[in-house]
Amino acid sequence: MLMIKTRLTLPQATDHVKTKPALICKSLLGHMLSATGDFGTSKIDDKYRDYVLDESMIIPKGIKVFYWIYPYMSLKVIRDIAMPRYRGEWSDFSRGGVGMFSILKYPPIGYLATDLDEYEGLHELTQYCGSRMDDKAEIPFRLDMIHPEYWPEAGEDNFVMGEKVWGLECLPDPVANESSI
């Protein structure tokens, strides 16, 4: 469900927000790590754990965090899936290999952590981490690039590999919201 229902079209523009990227990355990967439900022994969990528990590590080793505008009311957590580096036809998939992904989406931002250096033109949050956890940076947001609610994990131009249960979705309860007004 789209959070804002309007026919207003945003201009092709980028806005900047001042924030602390290293703190966001640290908390995001901590949430990803806790979303497994049990003590994982995967290589990706080891990388997340090393980063989250090491107070001196500002930027995660071997992991890039990307972000985009997510204007939907649902929260989604998807862990440890493999997706192709490039979306599109099979020839596109085979030219770039596959990356490991964990995705966390909640309004107004979606995040993905991957072992790939880039993904679908998204802004990379980890590149704005400074030399200290509290360093601030102005990070860009593309206001005109709104992906569908189930992007990047679904779509005709993609495929996902993972275990039987690889994510969860939470939606607001409209009845509960109406009774609290």
Image (cartoon, rainbow, N blue to C red):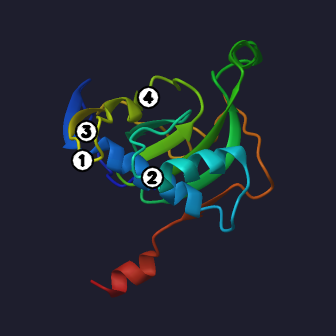
Q: Quadrant of the C terminus?
A: bottom left
Q: Is residue 109 visible?
A: no
Gap between marks 4 and 1, in whole Å? 24 Å
Task: Give the label, 4 or 2, closer to the camera.
Answer: 2
Gap between marks 4 and 2, in whole Å? 17 Å
Q: Secondary structure at mark 4?
A: loop
Q: Secondary structure at mark 2?
A: helix
Q: Secondary structure at mark 3?
A: loop
In percent of width and height, residue 50 lies at: 55, 49
Mark number, residue 8: 3
Mark number, residue 119: none
Gap between marks 3 and 2, in whole Å? 31 Å
Q: Tell me the crowding category of disc 3: few under 14, some 14 to 19, or many 20 or more residues within 10 angstroms, Cα based.
A: few
Q: Is residue 4 visible?
A: yes
In percent of width and height, residue 22 lies at: 34, 44
Mark number, residue 134: 1
- Say which label, 1 or 3, has the lower sequence index: 3
Mark number, residue 28: 2
Identify residue type, mark 4. Answer: Leu
Residue topped by disc 4: 122
